[in-house]
Image: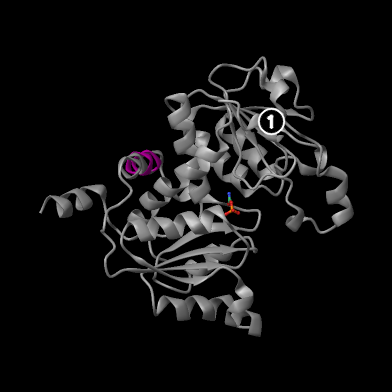
């Protein structure tokens, strides 16, 4: 496995997380640095995406590299039955970095075992989405002035939502208090509750997104109920509209509260929230560009210092 691969947010120490966030700030100040001249990056998306793929590809373009890949696996030879192993080995012949989204949990980890080319996991089933977590952390840091001692409420599909799983793991370094709000069918999986217990992370479990919960929250992290993960679509229909945040529900919230959502949203945030200054989800998606520029450079072994040196010549 290439040590620069990023499969799980758990791969990163607190210091590494903070370094990446500092790098993201550097890229936000100026996203255009032609440091990837001659580098080719593959984006292999076996599952649909708007933000993750386009922000990664924009990141490569703004850094002066080139992108190959597919956004629909049906246009690749995997539709003819080619295995993931063979696909990864083939693409590794052509590129310096592979950014990969796959519907199977563990697919990114598996890919790191068949190539020495660095891999960035852009989401594997309901498991992990570490690059989303970096932009989430960056968004939290920007809006709250830091990451420590925050009250974070996660709402919706906590069972299948890979973004909440990754964010929970990353926040373990920063003494959070979590509130997990979901219907019982979509509760936070046992392994993450056990992790909180083991690490002494404070949490409460709720089924109602009540005024008491909202009004004692710094970050309200809404999520979509993920139809594509349900083995039984009748079950999805039953739980899909359990939570819907509207503007009136924010009337008693803290001044510093920000509403985050990895997007896409369906009905879980009403459009009347969009103009509330506490709605941060579109800015959050914008932050993805800077966080992903930082992750691409890290995966390729390029530091911000290298960039500054190259640009001062
Ligand atoms: N947040 C996120 O992963 O969005 P996409 O599915 O559009 O990439």
**In the rendered view, does 299 fall on the left or right side of 277?**
left
Q: Residue at x 61, y 34 (%)?
A: 196
Residue 77, by quadrant, is: bottom right
Farthest residue, direction bottom:
80
Say whether residue 48 is left or right of residue 210: left
Q: Is mark 1 within 8 Å of ligand 1?
A: no
Image coordinates of residue 230 in percent, x first then y, are 79, 55
Instruction: Please tell me which residue is depicted at 63% across the width and 60% down the height of the picture.
Output: 105
What range is drawn magenta here? 17-23
Q: Identify the residue under disc 1.
A: 272
Residue appearing at x 35%, y 56% in the figure: 62
Taking the image as shown, residue 153 lies to the left or right of residue 310, namely right
Compared with residue 98, is residue 154 higher up or lower down, i.e. above or below?
Answer: above
Instruction: Quadrant for the N terminus, please.
Output: bottom left
Q: Quadrant of residue 35?
A: bottom left
**Label 1's element?**
helix
**Position in image of residue 108 (x %, y %):** 53, 63
Mark 1 surroundings: few (<14), some (14-19) or many (≥20) residues within 10 A: few
Residue 140: in magenta span: no
Residue most extreme to the top: 252
**Dominant SS in magenta:** helix
**Residue appearing at x 59%, y 58% in the figure:** 49
Vertical position of residue 296 compared to residue 173: above or below: below
């Amino acid at each position: 496995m290439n040590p620069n691969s990023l499969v799980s947010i758990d791969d990163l120490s607190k210091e590494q997380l903070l370094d990446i966030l500092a790098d993201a700030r550097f890229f936000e100040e100026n996203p255009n640095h032609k440091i990837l001249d001659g580098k080719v990056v593959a984006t292999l998306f076996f599952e649909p995406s708007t933000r993750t793929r386009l922000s990664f590809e924009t990141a490569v373009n703004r850094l002066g590299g080139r992108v190959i890949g597919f956004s629909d696996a049906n246009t690749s030879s995997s539709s003819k039955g080619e295995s993931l192993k063979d696909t990864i080995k083939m693409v590794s012949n052509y590129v310096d970095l592979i950014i990969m989204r796959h519907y199977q949990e563990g697919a990114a980890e598996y890919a790191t075992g068949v190539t020495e080319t660095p891999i960035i996991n852009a989401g594997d089933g309901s498991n992990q989405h570490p690059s989303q977590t970096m932009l989430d952390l960056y968004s939290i840091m920007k809006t709250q002035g830091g990451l420590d001692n925050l009250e974070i409420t996660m709402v919706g599909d906590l069972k299948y939502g890979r973004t909440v799983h990754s964010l929970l793991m990353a926040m373990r370094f920063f003494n959070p208090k979590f509130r997990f709000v979901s219907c019982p069918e979509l509760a936070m999986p046992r392994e993450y509750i056990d992790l909180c217990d083991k690490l002494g992370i404070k949490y409460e479990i709720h089924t109602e997104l009540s005024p008491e919960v909202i009004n004692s929250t710094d970050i309200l992290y809404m999520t979509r109920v993920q139809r594509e993960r349900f083995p039984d679509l009748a079950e999805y229909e039953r739980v899909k509209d359990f939570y819907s945040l509207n503007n009136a529900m924010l009337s008693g919230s803290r001044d510093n509260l920000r509403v985050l959502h990895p997007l896409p949203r369906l009905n879980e945030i009403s459009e009347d929230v969009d103009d509330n200054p506490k709605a941060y989800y579109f800015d959050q998606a914008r932050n993805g560009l800077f966080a992903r520029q930082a992750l691409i450079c890290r995966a390729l072994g390029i530091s911000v210092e290298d960039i500054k040196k190259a640009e001062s010549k």
